Image (cartoon, coloured by chain):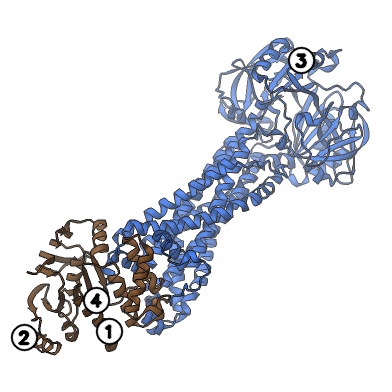
Amino acid sequence: MKSILLILWANIKRRKVQTLLVALCIALAALLFSSLIGIGLGMERPFENLYAKLKASHIVMEFDKNIHNPQEIKNWFEAQEEVESVSVPRLEKGLRKKLLFKGEELINQVQFREHHGNTQNHDNLDIIIGEEKEYPHPGEIWIPNHWRNNTDFVLGDTILVPTDNGTFPLIISAIAVDAHHSNGLSDPAPAWLGPGGLAMIFPTKDLSFVTLGIRLQNPNQTEKVWARFNTQYSYQGFSTLYSLFKQVFQIVYQITGGILFVFAIFGIIITLIITSSVVNSAIKTDYKMIGILKAQGFTNRNIVSIYVLQFLLITSIAVPFGLIGGYFMTQMVFKSLIAAIGAINFEVSLLLPSIATYFAFLFAVSAITAWTSRKATQIQPVTAIRNGGPPQKSFVGSRFSIFTLRPKSNLVVFLGLRYLMSNKKRSALLLVGLLFVVFVQTLFVNATHSLSLLEENRPAWGFLDSDLVIRQNTDPGRIEEDFLKEDLEDDDRIKSLVKTDFYAASIPAKEDKAPETIIGIIFDDELEKLGVISIEGRHPVFEDEISIGVTTSKELGKEIGDTLVLFLEGQLITYNITGLYQSLGNLSRGFYARLEAITEVNPLYKLRSYHIRLAKTQSIPAYYDELLTNYGSAYTIIESRKRLGVLKGIIKGIQDVVNLVSLLFLGVLFVTVFNDTVLSIREGQRNLGIFKAIGMTPYQLQKALIVKSVIIAILAILIAMPLSLYIIPKALDTLTTASGLVEFPYVFNLNYTLLVIPVVILLTISSVWLASKRLLKIRPRILVSE
Amino acid sequence: MEETLLQSKELYKSYNTGKTIVPVINGINLTLYKSDFTVIMGSSGSGKSTLLYLLSGLEVPSSGEIWLEDKPVHTLDEKMMTLIRRKYIGFVFQDFNLVPNLTFLENILIPAYLVKNDRQQIKDRALDLMQKMKIKDLKDRLPSEVSGGQQQRCSMARAIINNPDLVMADEPTGNLNSSSSEAVLDILSELNNKGQSIVMVTHEVKSACRANRIIFLRDGHIEDDLRFDKDLKFEEKEVQLLKWLAGKDW
């Protein structure tokens, strides 16, 4: 054993650069892998922690207290054995207009909710910034943390609430987080006033909606309790259950985790390739030594042990460095994501991922080393000692004339090709490594491009593609005639005008399944005018038709051609499903239906939002200003693109992670090529000495090595890029299916993709150039037989 | 009047082994002349090969000067030295040092392609040289597929393909059997007869007798310098050399 250790140690000392490079690769891959596990394991934890800490409700009901008696419902739930606590009914008020801050409208839609204090020990709020007190005092407002993604709020700022009687000022006295809406994906999201705070702003007759939260002992019982409630009550309000809150919260983690998963797998493959390559090279270089060792009595097992132990030692030292990097990466990812979703500080415990990563790497590297070093067992001592190396194979008869030196050959290119062909296996391994790197970079540029086109490519993401939205502020019952539409229809500057509105219907209870609120979009014109895309089938045209989101389709098990029964306006109505669509906005839950589908059962129903698409020559901001001047008091006017502000903040969090990983992979490219060059030089040291002796300059030899690596890089580009065109969209579809995007709005950008080519090639050249600087140190003296 | 080809002045070379400095060449002053066949002899460790490598520019001296005609080799950087070597010096190694994954023909062509542009003419010359050295049939073979003698002949063809002013050979017959050795030495003699300057390191008396000048090294300095008369026959040279060497405790 001691003799094995002595040789092992001598090998490490002899190949310091090599050892360092392998260690670096292992560390990088360990970093990615541990980050992946850390994020995977930590994905649920922020949500669960927040939920437990704030005693959040598993069922949140919002209903009109004129229809249901809040106290009666509260009493019913309190009588259920699964229920831990029920909140007091709290008044809430959705605001159709936008809040004003420093003269500008806020991007975020608000739903005011009265907060009765954390002493209730139910649906508590966590104060991030501000004085810890029971609830906001009169004239004060607590705002959710995620609002700060788009606007720089500080304590003491004043927010103006537009009402029918002018604006009402509220001073921000705290920035808080609740467990249900910390993710900015829920819009509108609540901002909080103290008890009685709503009555100071709005007439009492407009304050009939209350929210009631039910917290269960076990979240898994949510569906069961909710189903039981619905068998006893004909509930006509809104409801949101634990599973939906959780799903919305985890979207960002799922996408990020998915991307990291792909990258981590690539990282591990590249590491194993490099390790295998290094072991291969070591065996080639040690060919004679292995023969001598065998002649001295070393068994094949002893020889394999030398390499396995050597790489185990390197791995055991390198992985902890990767784990440290992984810790910071995970913290950074969580920090970035948590900031984007407005949640509180969170420490991820990486003990388990670290242990898992450590042993996974020890196993993987040992396995690949043992596998690769089998070659050493085939070395015959006599041949090895006599020849000093494996027998050379002839190139004679090669069908590729490019590999033969001809009068017209460029000497440097010829030598580069010969380097490439002299160790085909390692060239192939380098090719595989570069394939992954090119793939990741192509994925990076196109995914980033696709994400950056969120605004321009709204239909593909499932958002309505209008320039401006005008929404009536007042109750439609109070306006007898809708003059606005006539004005707008006469305006030549408008290309298309579609009226829409949200509509809440219910999916009736079925067996163990509780009734469920489903939010639809009702429209009065062709949906194509708003760019709405059907993934399958077509948009509804008749009053008995409906198209549904892909998530709804999946959850209900409904397809095109099936019927869907909805409970609306007190009646059960059957609709034919004509199409499926996707939308990130509501995770592809919901439906589209024509206005006639509702007026059939409620002739008084009116749509209150106008989606306007202007002619191309028109300026959106100018038209917005004009509308604001003419109709500002009676209507809320919004530039459609600004509505995506909240989402963009979240996407930025994902982009930051992708950017970081992409940079890591450029590092991997550099190390992989560097390593290959060092191996080529080490193996071909004698040949390089000969070339120098016969008159080749180090610069020419460096160029030959560059030619070899660049040829491989070009091959990798030629293979990976076309493949990525096919694979990347499918991979992204898979990654985002959980978010309701079954077809990721992938936009291929040729220019950015082509930009990958010079980046990869330049990095390859610089890596070879740096690695081959040691060529200058090779002295032809090594050719002398002493 | 002999024409100077290469000259060394107060040439020193020592190696730093980490703990100690080992002197190998200790102040050698030497002049080599054009068209001479010079042999460097000496016991093992006397510095023969090191001197050869210093003179060819493959090694950098610790101090001293080396002049190739009017070119101060000792002042040139590696690139310039490579260019000089490429044009003026051909080298034959004991271990042949052919590039193992290049064919015989490719091994010969590469140094020539580095220098000249008329590639077809170079190829013709390479094939011609191979013909003369009786290895033309092996042009597409790899070094590992042929005998040592054939490899050394290929190595010699490579050394002279550019018509260098000087051919340096480091124990070219050291790894060959007697018949192959004779063939290699015959080629060197033939080259020299045509005016080619040759410097060869050897410790074999029979090989050394091909030369017209013998330099004897001991402990890194020139102990003696012997010149044969032009008219001497091979056997006479051998007797004279043996007597000469006997006096040097050879």
What's the mark number on residue B247? 2
Which tag is nearer the camera, tag 1 or tag 2?
1
**Amino acid beneath label 3:** Asp
**Amino acid beneath label 4:** Glu
Q: Colour of chain B?
A: brown
Q: Establish whether labels 4 and 2 are both on one chain.
A: no
Cα–Cα span, label 2 and label 3: 120 Å
**Amino acid beneath label 1:** Ala
Chain of the residue under the numbered disc 2 shown in the image? B
Cα–Cα span, label 1 and label 2: 30 Å
Find disc 3 in the rendering and name its residue.
A491
Residue A462 position within the rendered picture, expressed as x and y whole percent measured from the top left: 73, 36
Q: Quadrant of the C terminus of chain B?
A: bottom left
Chain of the residue under the numbered disc 4 shown in the image? A
Which chain is the one coloured blue?
Answer: A
Please rate how many residues cluster around mark 1, counting C-alpha atoms within 10 Å: few if below 14, some from 14 to 19, many from 20: some
B63 vs B155, left or right, is left
A508 vs A355, left or right, is right
Q: Quadrant of the N terminus of chain B?
A: bottom left
Which tag is nearer the camera, tag 4 or tag 2?
2
Cα–Cα span, label 3 and label 4: 97 Å
**B53 and B199: which is toward the camera:** B199
Residue A508: which quarter of the image? top right
**A563 and A40: which is toward the camera:** A563
What's the mark number on residue B183? 1
Q: Establish whether labels 4 and 1 are both on one chain.
A: no
